[in-house]
Image (cartoon, rainbow, N blue to C red):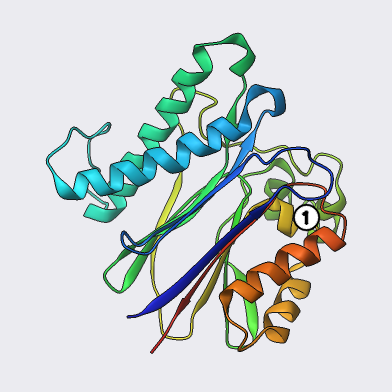
Amino acid sequence: MPFKSFGITDKGIVRDHNEDSLLANDAEGLFLVADGMGGLSKGDVASKIAVDTIAHFIKDSRLEDITWPIKPLQNYSLEENRLLAAISLANWNIFNEALKDPVNRGMGTTLVGFLLDGDQMVIANIGDSRMYLIKDNRIQQITDDHSLVMEEVRKGNMTLEEARVHPHKHVINRALGISETTQADISTRKFEARDLYLICSDGLTDMLTDEEMFSLVQASAGKGLSALGDTLVEAAKNNGGKDNITVVLINFHE
C-alpha cells in the first residue's frame, strides 16, 4: 500500500539546543522519534545513537548474515525480533557511550516508532514519546506512556487532567541507555488506507491536547503532510514551546 511521510524537529522557544532525533526512512519502512534525556549528560547524543543504531541494524540485517545482539524470541515474528534486536543494540551502545566519560552518566532517550512488515506495522515504545492514529473523525493514542503519573492514571489513582499538570509528569520509568538492558513494548497492528499516524515527542503533547492536535489535523486537510507538520510545530511553539518538538507523520493511501 502506498504511503507518504514527513518529519520535522524544532528546538522550541525555551531550550537552547535540540536533544530530539527522528527518522523517516520510506525505503526501509522505518519511522522513529527519540527524545534524549540528560541535558549536560548529552541527551542529544543518546537520541542520535538510538536512531542511527536501529536504522543501521535494520538495513544490515536484511542485506547480510550479521550477528544479532539477542536471541530471537519464539513468540515474536521475524520483524518483531528484528526491531527488538535493533533496540537492544541501541540500548547497549548508549549505555557503553555513557561509561566512557563521567559527564555522560545519566544519558538516555525515549523511543517510539514502527517498522513496516507487509500489511502490518511492528510498533515499539519506550518512555513517554507517543504514537497516534488519526482516522474516522477521531484521534487515538496507541502507545502507553512509561511514566510515573500515567501508571497512576492506569491504576485509577489520577485523572488524565491531573496527570497533565502534575509537577512530576516528566519522570519516566523506562528509557534506552540508562541500564545494561531495557524493556520495550512491542506490538503489531494492521494498517489501512486513509490511516494517518502521528509520532511525536512530548514537546508536542505537553503544549497541545489531543483535541487541539486533532483540530489542527482537520484544519490542515488537503494541505499535505509538510504543511500539517509545520502547523503542529508552530502551534506548540505558540503555546509556550517549552521543550524540543518533533513530529513524524505517515499517511497510507488507497
**Rendering coords of residue 233 (x, y %):** 72, 63
Q: Quadrant of the N terminus?
A: bottom left
Which residue is painted at 19% across and 50% down in the image? 62
Q: Is 60 positioned to the left or the right of 250 in the image? A: left
Quick check: can you spot residue 208?
Answer: no
Which residue is painted at 51% across and 28% down in the image? 177
Q: Is residue 238 above or below residue 50?
A: below
Q: Is 162 positioned to the left or the right of 72 in the image? A: right
Q: Amino acid at mark 1?
A: Asp
**Rendering coords of residue 221 (x, y %):** 64, 87
Q: Is residue 88 above or below residue 250?
A: above
Disc 1 on helix, strand or loop?
loop
Dot 1, crowdedness within 10 Å: few (<14), some or many (≥20)? many
**Toward which corner of the image does residue 137 lie, by quadrant?**
bottom right
> How many numbered tags mark residues here?
1
Nearer the observer, 85 or 249: 249
**Rendering coords of residue 231 (x, y %):** 72, 71
